[in-house]
Image: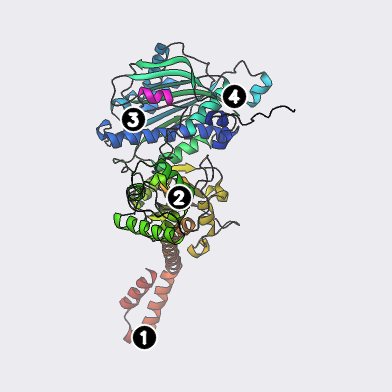
Amino acid sequence: MGKRARGVIKKGTIAGFMRKRTQLVGFDMGLNKHMQYVAEFLDNSLDAIEALYWENSSSYFLDENSIELLDACVRRVKEYLGDGNSPVDLYEPRSSRDIIAEVKSFLEPITPLLDDREPVVYIRLREVKKPPFLDDKQHQRYKMYELTVFDNGVGMVPEDVKMYGIYLASSKSERLRQTRGSQGFGAPSAFSDAQMTTGKPIIVASKHYTLDYGSVEVFFTTQENMKQYIIKSHRISLPFEHGTYVRLFYLNIPYKRGYADTYVKLTSLMNPHVSIIFVDPYGDIHAYPRRELEFPPEPKYTKPHPASITIGELQDLLRGTKSSTLLSFLTRTFVRISDERAKKIIEETARELKEKGLPPVDSSTDPKTLSKEQIEVLFRVMSSQKYISPPKDTVVPVGADVLKRIVGEFLQPEFVEAVTRPPTSGKGLSYVVEACIAYGGKVEVATSPSNVLWRFVNRTPKLRDSSDCAIWKAVTSVNWKNYKLDVFENGMPKGPIKIIVHIAGPFVHLMFKGQSKQALAEDENLIKEIKLTLEEVGRKLRAYISGKEQAERRAMRASVLTSFADKFVKSLVKILETDERLGNNVSVEELINRMKSVIE
């Protein structure tokens, strides 16, 4: 007899899979990796700050002195940094007391912001002196960087600190909401890449706003979704009221401007309700003060829309439901299914099952007992119904007025206009398209198509995979010549122009092309909405350019007439004085008035 066959399928974990595939979420070696690190933790920080405000708005004192306060803190940061260009020594804490001292020192320059309860994210990226595991040749190509991030957001309770970095903390797997990230794949992937490329642990300190104590820990994550502790998580007094502090090390090619700093700048544009400070490895301080006195309203979670689900999703929902009857399952699980509509679906399903000779169902049927054939008929009946569009209160746009004002302050153009379209829906979820065009003034003339468009999704900038995104394709499909603009070969407008497009809503989480969330898939309705928004704001730009051209023609005509006015008037006067017939019909004063009206 031959050898007994053995199974070859091995049990794996998400952590083990992502450990060797962090490039799937943007952590591949290259300049974009610096941006990805900053993006992951900045996005999480903004979510945490908003969560705190929505839970307890009194935690922040929003007044109008944020610009002056931030300027003062920037001066303190400059004094604190000294020579920001020099690589720093590698420092690893040996005890919780070391961590407290480290956090206190890091936060010292922005203490006025924290004391004034200003919503703030503080990020510092520094180059570390040559690590011992790199030889001189390797060190010419790769550098070690220290990334430190703090936000005074909602903070984490000790139980969440223990799970932070090894489990997906996002709620989007169950219900969708308009969020940036909420610690999904990003933080675990960043931690994996950091320790895999440097061999250094992660340092976390966090305090929830409802607690009198915080938690600190220094750890490695493992392939088994566990933590190997250097300093184990425990309760401790922290030098801040609430928030989260993270410090890690990663390896990458040398830092260059135009990636991480650009991400921070554009993030501040769409999040004017938070102050952001980013210190880059050159020691440059990129500070963006809060410019809004109000936080955006909290977006609501959305249930599945019956027109958007697949049969597989219906099966999963039926298996995991807590409803005891089919009627309650339909009304509680889905949006836009009333009792009346649910009864109609059940009746039609029962009738079709009876025609097929299958066991019927009724309102009291236990949904978990449905057979494969019954589920297929139920799905077909549900899909054939016409439903009201999904609710619009799940979408929170920036708003045309705010967008226009902030972009105007940011770019200082001669023309700026914004449009926010009414909410629409796709795949059973609502979304909103917003667009803004800034033209002339201090807007730089674009040297390439990529410099024209800024793409945003749920208030986060998208700087990679531009040409593979639905937003890019929609912009290039607009006939910009109709709006008095020259275009590049690919159809993108050229000149002193900047186009900003923002897509907001839970819909976009279904439309991302990959885990890195840099591009939206092409969707016919989405592209149509973007085009309609751009065409609306484009008409306003055309009216402005036409008015400007008309004014320039009038000014040129007036300039020409003015240059000959003296000679012309003198000639007319001479004619009037010598020609009695003309003089009897028109006075000199009237001729002069006519000349003035022509010139004006």
Determine the residue located farthest toward the right in the rendered image. Answer: 1
Q: Which residue is mark 2?
A: 500
On the image, which quarter does residue 56 sit in? Answer: top left
**Can you give x and y, in whole percent of width and height, for residue 453 in the image?**
50, 49
Mark closer to the chain start, 2 or 3: 3
Disc 2 versus disc 3: nearer the observer: 3
Q: Amino acid at mark 4?
A: Lys
Q: Amino acid at mark 1?
A: Leu
**Can you give x and y, in whole percent of width and height, for residue 30 in the image?**
60, 33
Determine if the magenta segment contains residue 288: no
Mark closer to the chain start, 4 or 1: 4
Assess whether mark 3 and mark 2 are in contact (beta carbons under 8 angstroms): no
Q: Residues within 10 Å of mark 4 (few under 14, many from 20)?
A: many
Q: Residue 143: which disc? A: 4
Mark closer to the chain start, 2 or 1: 2
Assess whether mark 4 and mark 3 are in contact (beta carbons under 8 angstroms): no
Q: Which residue is mark 3?
A: 154
SS class, disc 3: loop
Q: Amino acid at mark 2?
A: Ile
**Quarter placement of the C terminus:** bottom left
Q: CA distance from mark 2 to mark 3?
A: 30 Å
Disc 2 versus disc 1: nearer the observer: 2
Disc 3 versus disc 4: nearer the observer: 3
Q: Residues within 10 Å of mark 3 (few under 14, many from 20)?
A: many
Q: Residue 582: which disc? A: 1
